[in-house]
Image (cartoon, helix red, strand yellow):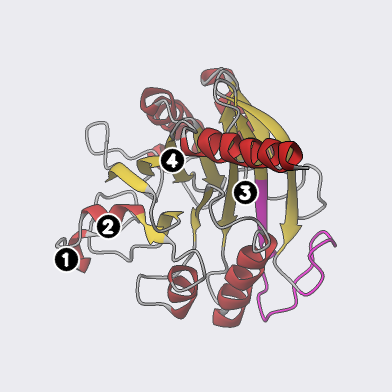
Amino acid sequence: MRHSIFSALALVMTSLTLQAQEPPLAVRVMSFNLRYINSGDTGEKTWLARRDQASQVIREDKADVIGLQEAFRSMLDDIAMRVPGYQEIGVGREDGKTVGEYAAILVRKDRFNVIESGTFWLSDTPAIPNSTTWKNHVTRICTWAKLEERSTRRVLHFYNTHLDHESQEAREKGTALILEHFAALPASTPVIITGDLNANETNPAISNIKNSPRRFLDTWRELNPAVPLVESGTMSMFTGVRDTAKIDYIFVPAGTRIIDSEIIRKNRDGVYPSDHYPVRAGVEFH
């Protein structure tokens, strides 16, 4: 009997020791609203004129996981041709297949295995494609992935979304639905949320994320607390302005080490790859 007790205690201690020695998980992340193909965009603003530049931004950053917004199927195909090495996750929001904008996730194949993934609609009927129930006229989705880091076998849960631009109810209920999706995971589980949330830093939808049980942190703001709002905008408007709203985010749970973060404002002779600036961050989970 005593031998059994000592054996059980030894197993528990070994398990705790292994957990304590679990290697950190460092991840380089990007969130990028590509600007959808719009017939009203002309000249340098068209996707055909921007696709090489947008792809170059992604390729040069070498992010491990990327959340894209406003991406049509043809745009994702263009990026795949120009930026090899990533596995794409996501569906078109209008039919759950290929029609409409994607909230796609790109995952570096050499770093992560995709264990599970899916897309749900931000509505009272999240399993029904193209569903809208919160006063939003545009369909909104969230794409998620459960990833396993190849070398350490550590697991990361990644969520990417594009919240509504008009309905505050849709923004708040959409964030609540996303938070609910992973609420049952252990508190120590690495989770990242990316997206164009169409909400500035004082919006209740953002507060809901920050005040949730995991106390999510805005990676960029954590490292740039003194930068005024007039210098914090993430919408380039194709002109390079900075005094627009900060609506593009990368969130990580409190306690995550934020190594660096940047609003990428690169341009080619005044020409920008999108009407949004990409946002990037390097983070480390322990």
As helix, strand or loop, the secondary structure at mark 4 comes to strand
Q: Position of residue 197 (x, y in %)?
A: 49, 63
Looking at the rendered structure, the number of numbered marks drawn on it comes to 4
**Do the numbered discs 2 and 3 sit on residues whose CB atoms are within 8 Å?**
no
Which mark sits nearer the N-terminus, 2 or 3?
3
Categorize mark 4 by other alpha carbons within 10 Å: few (<14), some (14-19), many (20+): many
Categorize mark 1 by other alpha carbons within 10 Å: few (<14), some (14-19), many (20+): few
Residue range (magenta): 124-144
Q: How far apart are marks 4 and 1 (CA)?
A: 22 Å
Q: Residue at x 66, y 69 (%)?
A: 177
Which mark sits nearer the N-terminus, 4 or 2?
4
Residue 211 is one of the magenta-drawn residues: no
Categorize mark 2 by other alpha carbons within 10 Å: few (<14), some (14-19), many (20+): few
As helix, strand or loop, the secondary structure at mark 2 comes to helix
Q: Would you say residue 217 is visible in this rendering?
A: yes
- The residue labelled by disc 2 is 222
- The residue labelled by disc 3 is 103
Residue type marked 4: Met
Q: Quadrant of residue 72?
A: top right
Please identify the quadrant where the N terminus is shown: top right
Q: Quadrant of residue 74?
A: top right
Q: Distance between the residues labelled 4 and 3?
A: 13 Å
- The residue labelled by disc 4 is 30
Judged by depth in the image, the label closer to the viewer, 2 or 3, is 2
Q: Which of 255 and 261 is in front in this view?
A: 255
- The residue labelled by disc 1 is 228
Q: Distance between the residues labelled 2 and 3?
A: 25 Å
